[in-house]
Image: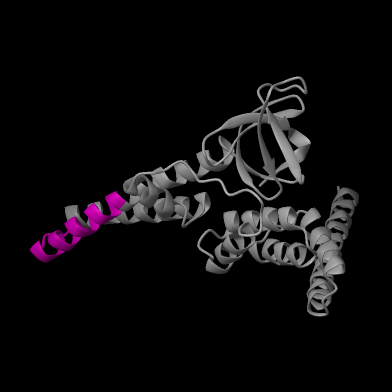
Amino acid sequence: MKKTLRIFSLLSILVGTCLGISANNDMQKMTDANKAYQQENYSKATELYKQIADSNNVGAVLFYNLGNAYYKNGDISHSLLWYERALQLDPGNDDIKHNIAFVNQKITDRIDPVPESAISEWWNHFSQQLTERQWSIISLIAAFLLAVTVILFMIIRSNTVHVISLITLILSLITLIFSIIFASKEKYRYIKQPEAIVMELVVTAKSEPTENGKNLFVIHEGLKVKITGTMENWAEIQIPNGEKGWVPINEIEKI
């Protein structure tokens, strides 16, 4: 038993040491990448940022820096890809939104999106201000406040407390309902209808998932599309104006 405990302790120390070394390596790479970027060595900066991302490090700042490095290196499609990934993690970040809008001015395709009603546009805009996780946290807080308010309303015999409790109860209930709806909406948007960036210079969409399919439309690098289906090595995409077509799955990359 003691021998087993010693082995377990040794393994724990070894794993902890390895994780510490890995974290230190990534911190050093981040420092080196930032330095390379400041020195305008964008190829090296891109390589180092990408190494950090490939080691399962996820962060809006990292992805944003990677998008900047790719843009400075003249790679528009990868720049937009990493900006969009950064925006998924930090949807309220104005700097990321600004850079996406700026780089989108440089892509070839100018496709007008399907018109939305003012209410639908507001609804989508508001729900996308936070991530699914953030909306879920808000729903938990609202549920807690709702429960506390109900308890206070029941046990404290005071008109003032009743009025305050009633107002808090209504606000908490409204917040709970909308945060659950928005969390579900964001989850659906990224899981059921994932988006992707066109990575090739020119991509021809087909009427069916085969090279013999009829040519439907041509799109270019940097365009953001929705993935509405997949079949073997093909993906059915929807472009902003609502048109759909099949493209080789290796010619786009999921955000």
Q: Position of residue 205 (x, y in %)?
A: 68, 31
- Residue 25 can be seen, yes or no: no
In the image, what residue occupies the spot 62% across and 54% down?
A: 84
- In-image side of 187 versus 78 (left or right): left
Q: Residue furthest left?
A: 159
157 magenta-colored: yes
Residue 205 vertical position relative to residue 255 in the rendered view, above or below: above
Residue 197 vertical position relative to residue 40 in the rendered view, above or below: above
Q: Position of residue 226 (x, y in %)?
A: 59, 39
In the image, what residue occupies the spot 42% across and 48% down?
A: 124
Q: Position of residue 179 (x, y in %)?
A: 39, 49
Q: 247 and 6: which one is in front?
A: 247
Q: Picture quarter containing residue 208? A: top right
The magenta region covers 156-174
Q: 124 and 183: which one is in front?
A: 124
In the image, what residue occupies the spot 73% across and 38% down?
A: 203
Q: Picture quarter containing residue 207? A: top right
Q: Position of residue 235 (x, y in %)?
A: 69, 30
Q: Picture quarter containing residue 148? A: bottom left
In the image, what residue occupies the spot 66% across and 54% down?
A: 107
Colour scheme employed for the rendering of this structure:
one colour
Disc count in the image?
Answer: 0
- Residue 84 can be seen, yes or no: yes
Q: 90 and 56: which one is in front?
A: 90
Q: 159 and 249: which one is in front?
A: 249
- In-image side of 5 versus 88 (left or right): right
